[in-house]
Image (spheres, rainbow, N blue to C red):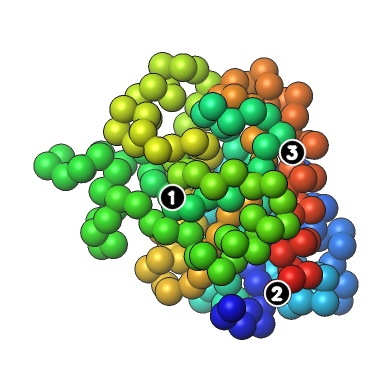
Amino acid sequence: MTKFDKIGIIGALSVEADGLVNEMSGVQTTEIGGSTFYEGTLCNKKAVVVKCGVGKVNAAFVTSALALVFGVDGIVMTGVCGGIGIKPMSSVVPTSFIQHDVDIDGLPHGHLDVLDCVEIAADSALSDVLAEATDGVRTVMATGEQFIRSKGQTDRILTDFPNVGAVDMESGASAHICARLGVPFACIKTVSDGCSADEFYDFVTEASNKSIAAVMGLLKRL
């Protein structure tokens, strides 16, 4: 496995990141553009943890900072996601990422400019260890700037991306930045809802804690 000296960890919400920060030692904080980066030691590993906020732009911002300012050599995103045919409280370790809301005239739906592709593969080394640390379902993650809350929305995603099994609002953007910068990226998210806002509030805390435990398991294995 590639040697990882310093890992960046991203959670979109406080409930997805605070549990990791609380376990860190020797913490120093840095404020950049409204985001607080917590740099210290986690499970005897150098780590930088940050809450990015919801959405692709926020995720891309902190991912860039982790790579360019803090010099991490691997990035992991943790948190919750919606499941398409995957029941709540199931862990998901994406094999790859697409952005379902990208639509450039004349190009395939989801085509990413500059990278010249639709699908971005997750780092296999980090993903394999995450899968070992949990009961993770391996599937394609679809990212977009909207909370998916209806069958009509999931049907539209599956029309163009039939292999998608989970949806979120951040991981595809972080994968995009990491691909451009050559930084290994992986994701562990726990299904908080079957694309339903009602279920989300029932499971978000418990689901977040399950993903946090998987990240801790990853760090102990690196």
Label 2 to label 1: alpha-carbon separation? 23 Å
Disc 1 secondary structure class: strand
The three-letter amino acid code for the residue at tag 3 is Ala
Residue 155 picture location, percent across and down: 39, 22
Q: Nearer the viewer, residue 145 or 218?
A: 218
Q: Which residue is mark 2?
A: 222
Circles 2 and 3: CB atoms closer than 8 Å: no
Label 2 to label 3: alpha-carbon separation? 23 Å
Identify the mark at residue 207; answer none if there is no mark: 3
Q: Image check: 194 left or right of 64?
A: right
Q: In the rendered image, which quarter is residue 35 located in?
A: bottom right
Residue at 74% in and 77% down: 46
Badge 3, how many Cα within 10 Å: few under 14, some, many 20+?
A: many
Residue 208 picture location, percent across and down: 74, 43
Q: Which residue is mark 1?
A: 97
Q: Is residue 17 visible?
A: no
Q: Earlier in the sequence, mark 1 or mark 3?
A: 1
Q: Nearer the viewer, residue 201 or 64?
A: 201
Q: Is residue 126 visible?
A: yes
